[in-house]
Structure formats: structure tokens, C-alpha cells
Image (cartoon, rainbow, N blue to C red):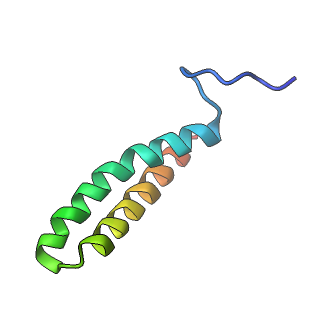
Amino acid sequence: MKPRFKFRNPPFKYRVLFVAAFLAVPGTLAGAMASLYFGRFAICMGVGALIGAIAGAWLEAGAD
């Protein structure tokens, strides 16, 4: 029988997804600030969000 989804202790793949999405937000903000220096607002925000999501997934996946 498959375990039910519990918000307090979600399965591993959902936990990684939640942390990646959570850390993509500060990455987006950091990309917006970097665009003040580099220009290209959309590219900087996209790269910042991608780096934040990768870092979040990497940190959470390394915990187990």
C-alpha cells in the first residue's frame, strides 16, 4: 500500500520540489538585482531562478 501524502512529512521527491521552488524565489530576486549591473532583465532573472532551484534541489537531495 502506498503511503499517503502528509504535509508535515512529504515524500522525498515532493520535498525536493518544494525546496527547489522555495529557493527559486530568492534566486529570481538576486537575478533582478544582477540585471541592474549586467542589463538583460529577463535573462538575469531566469538564470537566477534556475540557479536557486538547482541549489535548493541539491541541498535537499543531499540531506538523505
Residue drawn at point x = 73 percent, y = 21 percent: 4
Res 33 → quadrant: bottom left
Residue drawn at point x = 67 percent, y = 24 percent: 5
| The one of 19 and 37 positioned closer to us in this rendering | 37
Image coordinates for residue 42, horizontal then vertical, percent:
30, 71
- Viewer can see residue 63: no
Res 45 → quadrant: bottom left
Image coordinates for residue 46, horizontal then vertical, percent:
36, 67
Most distant residue in the right direction: 1
Q: Is residue 31 above or below residue 60?
A: below
Residue drawn at point x = 46 percent, y = 42 percent: 19
- Horizontal side, residue 3 vs residue 5: left or right: right
Q: Quadrant of the N terminus?
A: top right
Image coordinates for residue 53, horizontal then vertical, percent:
44, 55
Q: Quadrant of the C terminus?
A: top right
Image coordinates for residue 37, horizontal then vertical, percent:
11, 75
| The one of 12 and 34 positioned closer to us in this rendering | 34
Q: Is residue 7 above or below residue 17?
A: above
Residue drawn at point x = 54 percent, y = 45 percent: 17
Res 31 → quadrant: bottom left
- Viewer can see residue 57: yes
Q: Is residue 8 above or below residue 22?
A: above
- Horizontal side, residue 58 vs residue 34: left or right: right
Q: Is residue 22 above or below residue 2?
A: below
